[in-house]
Structure formats: C-alpha cells, structure tokens
Image (cartoon, rainbow, N blue to C red):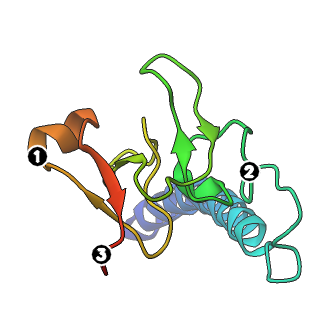
Amino acid sequence: MGGLIYRKKCRTCVSFCGSRCNTMRAVVVIAMCLVGMAMATTAETSDERGIIINLNNGELCAISPQCKSSCCHRQSALGLARCAPRAAENETCSKMSLYGTYYYCTCEDGLKCEGDWSIGGSIVNTNFGTCVDPHN
C-alpha cells in the first residue's frame, strides 16, 4: 500500500514538474532570443538602422538606450517620445531621469547640466538646467 501512495505522488509530481519544465524552457528560449537581439549590434553594424535599438533621431522610442544619441525626447506628458540629439552648450537640458525619457535631452559628452535638483523633480521629471563646460 505504501508503494501505491508513493507512485501516485510520483506521477503527480512528474506531470506537475513536466508542465513547469516546459514553461521554464519557453522563458529561457525567449530570454536567449532577446539577449541575441541586443548583442547583434557590434562596432561594424553601429551605423545601421535598428528596429528596437540603435534608432536614428526622429524615430519613436520608449527609453533613451534605444537611441544612437542616447536621448529619448518627449515634448509633453501625452506626446510620443522620439530620439533626439543631445543638448549642446548653453541649451536647456534635463538631468538624468528615472524614466529614461526626457522633456529636454541630457548634455553632450564633456558638458554638465547645471541647475537645481530635487527629489520631487526627479519623480515628475522637472529637473532642468543649462549645459555648461565644466572647464570654463
């Protein structure tokens, strides 16, 4: 009798684990595909237009790392975000945001966004400043 109970439990466990195993395999395959797509952009292909990453200015984006310029710009809270060039010296800029989209782009390399910063501004994306050269 003890053997029958053990077999029933074992069969239940095998069928339960088998379905869980199939789900886990699907998750692993999807994750590997996403990693492969992300790694598909190499130094040789960095000039090519992407579908999800490596987007040109003017193309729709969800977060800044998708854009070649590293700036996903949104003109209003309800507007669509598009890749845009980063802010040059003396232009209005945003400090780094938690959301990855900006009302004003971050500064170009070598420049610093100088302005007020607050925790509330980080939450509602209103920490704006002006790009300045820190060496001047």
How many residues crowd mark 1 within 10 Å: few (<14), some (14–19), many (20+)?
Answer: few
Q: Nearer the viewer, mark 3 or mark 2?
A: 3
SS at badge 1: helix
Q: Which numbered marker is on residue 41?
A: none
Q: Against 118, is 134 above or below?
A: below
User: Would you say 83 lies left or right of 124 here?
Assistant: right
* Location of mark 3 (residue): 134
What amino acid is found at the position of numbered circle 1 in the picture? Ile
| Mark 2 vs mark 1, CA separation in Å | 31 Å
Q: Nearer the viewer, residue 18 or 89?
A: 89
Where is the C terminus found, in terms of image quarters? bottom left
When asked about the image quadrant of residue 65, the answer is: bottom right
Q: Position of residue 39 (x, y in %)?
A: 73, 75
When asked about the image quadrant of residue 125, the answer is: top left
Residue sticking out furthest to the front: 136
Q: Position of residue 77 (x, y in %)?
A: 42, 21
Q: Nearer the viewer, mark 2 or mark 1?
A: 1
Sooner in the amino-acid sequence: mark 3 or mark 2: 2
* Location of mark 1 (residue): 119
SS at badge 2: loop
Q: Position of residue 8 (x, y in %)?
A: 49, 57
Marks 3 & 2, CB-CB < 8 Å contact: no
Residue sticking out furthest to the top: 78
User: Would you say 66 lies left or right of 59 here?
Assistant: left
User: Would you say 41 lies left or right of 119 here?
Assistant: right
Marks 3 & 1, CB-CB < 8 Å contact: no
| Mark 3 vs mark 2, CA separation in Å | 34 Å
Marks 2 & 1, CB-CB < 8 Å contact: no
Q: Nearer the viewer, residue 126 or 18?
A: 126
* Location of mark 2 (residue): 52
Q: Who's the residue at 43% across and 41% down the image?
A: 104
Sooner in the amino-acid sequence: mark 3 or mark 1: 1
